Image (cartoon, rainbow, N blue to C red):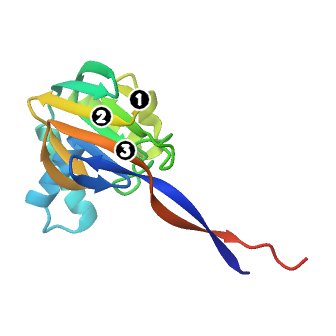
Amino acid sequence: GLYQAEEQRFDCGWLDQEAFINVAGVGFDAAVCAAQERRWRFLPGSISYVAAVLDALVHLRPSSITLKLDDTVLERQALLVAIANGQTFGGGMVIAPEARPDDGLLDVILVGPLSRSAFMRFFPLVYRGQHVNHPAVEVWRARRIEITASPAMPCQAEGEAMGYTPTLVQVEPGVIPFLIPRPSPGPP
């Protein structure tokens, strides 16, 4: 049948000067991106990703972070902080099961300290979005997120390595137009 398009407007996230539509983050996921770009890019896609995950696991250490979510300041130990406009990234990881790209907010998912073996058991939960119920995980929503960390943590936006903390992540609501096809009603 015929289709009509309906315009929807999605939010845009900014990690410092870098725009992202889906997910940015600091810590473990950014370390994986950096390792994949630096050392494992010559391997085929999924193999280079697994190699980069194992590489980042070897160096897995929590950082002491200060997280400013709008006007709330939190002190935490963290392995990673993912900041999501969309729900999934990295080939099917449901990092932010409740995220909506049009709500004017970013979902902030913090993973606290876990041993390597606990992290290895934790990691597969992300593919089903079940990690958010884990005791090491906290979830918030905010418009503006400032992150400082000691030691500094690597940053990523849309899977591209983006230097180190401190970093500022913000949302710009409703600036990306998307056309969503809608089936048109057929003849009466």
Badge 1 amino acid:
Trp
Q: Which residue is mark 3?
A: 171
Residue 131 figure quarter: top left
* Earlier sequence position, callout 1 versus callout 2: 1
Residue 64 figure quarter: top left
Badge 3 amino acid:
Val
Query: In the visual, does 27 lie left or right of 180?
Result: left
Disc 2 crowd, CA 10 A, few/some/many (<14, 14-19, 20+): many
Q: Which residue is mark 1?
A: 140
Q: Is residue 31 above or below residue 48?
A: above
Q: CA distance from mark 2 to mark 3?
A: 9 Å
Q: Quadrant of the N terminus?
A: bottom right
Circles 1, 2 touching at the beta carbon (< 8 Å): no
* Earlier sequence position, callout 3 versus callout 1: 1
- Name the residue located 42 percent from the left edge and 51 percent from the top edge: 88
Tag in front: 1 or 2: 2
Q: Which residue is mark 2?
A: 145
- Name the residue located 51 percent from the left edge and 43 percent from the top edge: 103
SS of the residue under disc 2? strand
Please state which of residues 140 and 174 is positioned toward the viewer in this rendering. 174
